[in-house]
Amino acid sequence: MPQPPTPTIVAALRWGATDYREAIRWQAARAAAVADGSAPETVLFLEHHAVYTMGRRGGRKHLLRPEFALGAEVIDADRGGDITFHGPGQLVVYPILRLRERSIGIARYVRLLEQAMIETAAAFGVRAERRRGQPGCWVEERKLGSVGVRLSHGVSTHGLALNVCTELGWFDAITPCGIAGARITSLSQELGRSVSVNEAAETMRAAFNDIFALRLAFPTRLSTAARP
């Protein structure tokens, strides 16, 4: 029988609430270093302060309120996808991986990120799935998580966002991911009880290890190391 691949040791970082621009600057610097071999591949787990981000497919037409009335800044991002919200209670994962070396293209990579969210939801007893033509993670007609990625010089940036205990009212100000009529949900909403981001991050870490054949381990406490 063929032997399973030996897990690749990859650095795992767990940050707390982080400014979106700070995280993007850090990603860009780390991705360039990963591409030239001067830094290890890294998977970053964090939450963001409240912010709306606009992907390359996004347009201001999907803002349902004037920007001054949103309560959070709108920032253009260089990832794929449309407009979404990031904020407290949402687990954001930014894998900075050498996808080209793994022979993983963008379409397959998106499916793998979706699978990580599906497996994480399943571990909490929530049955989630994909929807054709609508990337992300869905519970029936309710969107639980989003995917938006970028690949440059064979290295991935951006990633996924899973609603864990997010205040869902933030999504009322936009057409999430540009999908008219989309309803947003969270693990806590589906379960009728509170789930912490820390719980979800640990479960997501295990899913990444399984799906990408990695060996990720968090530090013993939330880290501010290696920030810009």
Image (cartoon, helix red, strand yellow):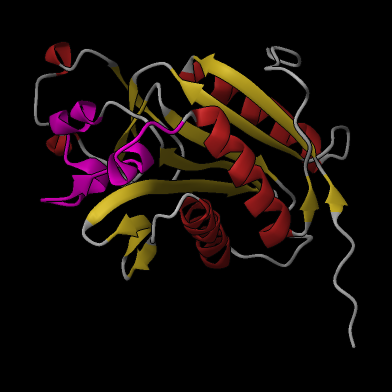
Q: Quadrant of residue 62?
A: top left
Q: Is residue 102 found inside the magenta-colored segment of the image?
A: no
> In this orientation, does residue 221 appear?
yes
Quick one: 167 or 79, which is closer to the camera?
167
The relative height of residue 52 versus residue 145 in the rendered view (above or below) is above
Q: Which residues are magenta?
A: 168-195
Q: Nearer the viewer, residue 67 or 219?
A: 219
Is residue 154 among what the camera can see?
Answer: no
Q: Is residue 184 magenta?
A: yes
Q: Residue at (52%, 61%) from the top-left corner?
A: 115
Q: Quadrant location of the C terminus? A: top right
- Residue drawn where x is 46% and y is 21% of the image: 48
Q: List x then y, in percent, for residue 63.
A: 15, 31
Q: Position of residue 42 (x, y in %)?
A: 74, 37
The image shows residue 107 at horizontal and vertical percentages of 51, 66
Query: Does residue 6 lie above or below 121 as drawn?
Result: below
Asked whether, in this view, residue 44 is left or right of residue 48, the answer is: right
Q: Position of residue 118 (x, y in %)?
A: 47, 58
Give the residue drawn at x 53%, y 38%: 200
Q: Residue furthest bottom?
A: 1
